Image (spheres, helix red, strand yellow):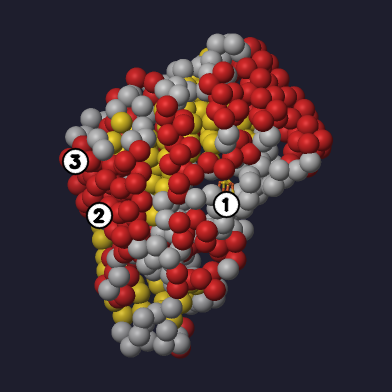
Amino acid sequence: MRPSTYFSGENQELFLQDIRAIMNLFQIGAAGPPLGRSSWQQLAEDSFYIDNYAAIEADAVRVSTAVFVRESAAVISFEQAHQAASLPVEAAKTARRLVRLNLLLLMRRITGEKGGPWGILSGVRPGKMVRKLLEPGLTPETVIDKLIGDYALDRDKAELIVEVVGRQNRLPQFRHNARQISVYIGIPYCPSRCLYCSFPGFALPAEAAVGSFLTALAMDLRAARQLIDQYGLELQTVYIGGGTPTSLLNEQFRQLLEMVKFFLGETVPAEYTVEAGRPDSLNQIKLELLKQYNVNRVSLNPQTMQEKTLKLIGRKHTVEDIISMFQKLSSMEQFYINMDIIAGLPGETEADMQDTVTRIAALHPDNVTVHTLALKKGSRLKMSLEECSELLPGRQTTENMLAIARQAMAELNMHPYYLYRQKYMSGNLENVGYAKAGTECIYNVQIMEENQTILGVGPAATTKAVQPLTGQIKNCYHPKDVHTYMKNLTTYLAERNAVIAGLFE
Ligand code: SF4
């Protein structure tokens, strides 16, 4: 019988998070609080018991992991030479990695399942770890072998992440410059709420309410500008996201772009992006405004080119609308155009993904970001999962969809250049940004690799302060709720000022 719940042993405090992470890969939940070892024989048939033992010695960390089911016990044991055992933090990290690896291999043996292609890596930014592995001069091949051996990644994922990091390292704009920053501006409105979205995208309110919001945003931008002046910072990129910024009415959208120009300077940074999201949020006037204010990147995000799915996920536009808006944007010859798609949408098959990427390829966008569906808390999809769980493609299908997209991107001569993972992702997979050489969105790389300080402006925006010397990161958050943001803005701005002062004073 496949176990569906587990108990961990007592004295496992150091490993509880690791046990949970691996059990999540196999959709096995904790049955209750930790149990004493002698209790394992009273387990229910579908539960099992996990115990780890770690010994930290002068030159090695030895970990053995035991999994007990009612009839039998499976024990697996690994050891690893560890040069820095005298450093307790390093030794504990190694012990935790070995516990994860042991458990993953055991669970693969017990369930006959793989638990996803990323092995024991569960972080959002696998590239950061790979960059550290490459730093001491290890060859890409050695790092790939290490990812497979020490972290149980599938070879194609190990090769993918090493390729992404290598490409990022070769981007001249990625070099660390302590005084160079980016600004992210969040606009919290959307034409309607997509089924899978957990972002509190509010429907556009009455004009007066948007006016008050824009007044608050101006105050936020002014404070950001003061920080730039005070510390002699240089702006590398500006990114207006959300929500869907282009869901503002024409005049409101003009005011937004005018404010950005006024506060962030006449000199537009080399990279200025606006997320247009859906084609039904754009019109000829907004296109002209994008051009007039020197925006040079636009993200038009179909998510799928399947009519049936657009309806199901709550989009109010057609595939034809996407194609026609893309052609308008493209004919203006001013923008690098990104398109986002999602693998694993309800009701979709590999054939749907093949059709979607074929239609996207026909448009020749500069960038394509291939997301994996994430079942985020607070999304309508998560809440209605019981009704439509049978519509969700399985783990293997979603993995195949990503492979189809990757192949299509390679045929378009587009290369993977940033990659991140999220919680609650279908199949424990990944999101990958592809670009034609020279068209990479630097903001995406900077934020995902936490390589640069980002000032967050607007509701739900995060300010990420990256310590220039140590790389240490301090985040501060604006609230998601627009009214809370407006009401307590001075408090949030003071917090942001303090975080940035901590970097440069
Ligand atoms: S997915 Fe994007 S467009 Fe859809 S509701 Fe969420 S933020 Fe808005």
Which of the two marks, 1 or 3, is nearer to us in this view? Answer: 1
Q: Residues within 10 Å of mark 3 (few under 14, many from 20)?
A: few
Q: Is 468 above or below relative to 155?
A: above
Q: Which residue is mark 2?
A: 154
Which one is closest to the eye, mark 2 or mark 1? 1
Residue 443 position, x and y percent, is 47, 29
Residue 40: give x, y in percent of width and height.
Answer: 43, 82
Q: Is residue 236 above or below residue 315?
A: above
Q: How many numbered callouts?
A: 3
Residue at image location 49% in from the left, 55% down from the top = 310
Question: How far from the left and from the top, in percent, is residue 306?
Answer: 42, 56
Residue type at mark 3?
Thr
Instruction: Between residue 183 and residue 6, name the one nearer to us.
Output: 183
Mark drawn on residue 316: 1
What residue is at 45 percent from the left and 87 percent from the top? 44
Say whether marks 3 and 2 touch (CB < 8 Å): no
The residue that disc 3 covers is: 142
User: Can you give x and y, in whole percent of width and height, for residue 225 in the image?
Assistant: 65, 17
